[in-house]
Amino acid sequence: MRAVFAILLAMFFATSSKADENANSIIGVWKQTSAFEKDVASGETEPVQKSEVQSGYRIFTREGRAFIFNLYKPRKPASAGASDADLAALFRTMSVLTGTFAVERNLVTISVDESWIEAWNGTKRTFEFDRKGDTLTMTVGPTRNAYTGREILLISTLIRVENF
């Protein structure tokens, strides 16, 4: 009986250690270098929002907070008195959310506190991740594109810029 208990205890700590290792592997500040949508039906890929340049950051803290901010360029600068159409175009060329996160195996789940899409507030967003050195690839989906309604995978590549 003691042997069985010892084995179960060892398995628990080995699993906890691996979970901690996976969570620690994404802690830090990550700069987005690319973001693509892959159409689930056709398999075709294109840059998010058909943008020429994608930029942004993802921050994961040891305290379990996550922050995601992305811009899809080109973006026309807003000026005082910008039209509703200009402001809507700026809104469509960004994404942002924040919340708490948990890691299990190669999945990070963010419990969304606030998002640029109000319907996501209070929900959970799950990303599959693969980290190789200072490069992190995150995939979400299948999900519906917020603007086109197409079913897509969203694939982002990031590089670590700070580890804390």
Image (cartoon, helix red, strand yellow):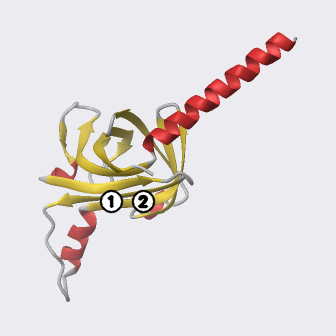
Quarter that holds the N terminus:
top right
Residue 3: x percent and y percent? 81, 11
Residue 123: x percent and y percent? 53, 53
Q: CA distance from mark 2 to mark 1?
A: 7 Å
Using the image, determine if residue 130 lies above or below residue 24. Answer: above
- Residue occupied by mark 1: 95
Residue 152: x percent and y percent? 31, 40
Callout 1: helix, strand or loop?
A: strand
Q: Are marks 2 and 1 in contact (CB under 8 Å)?
A: yes
**Residue 79 located left or right of residue 105:** left
Residue 97, numbered circle: 2
> Could you tell me which residue is drawn at 18 percent across and 78 percent down?
78
Residue 34: x percent and y percent? 22, 46
Q: Is residue 95 visible?
A: yes
Please name whichever residue, 15 or 105, is drawn nearer the observer in this view of the structure.
Answer: 15
Using the image, determine if residue 18 lies above or below residue 149. Answer: above
> Could you tell me which residue is drawn at 52 percent across and 31 percent down?
105
> Could you tell me which residue is drawn at 41 percent across and 54 percent down?
59
Tell me where residue 42 sits by quadrant: top left
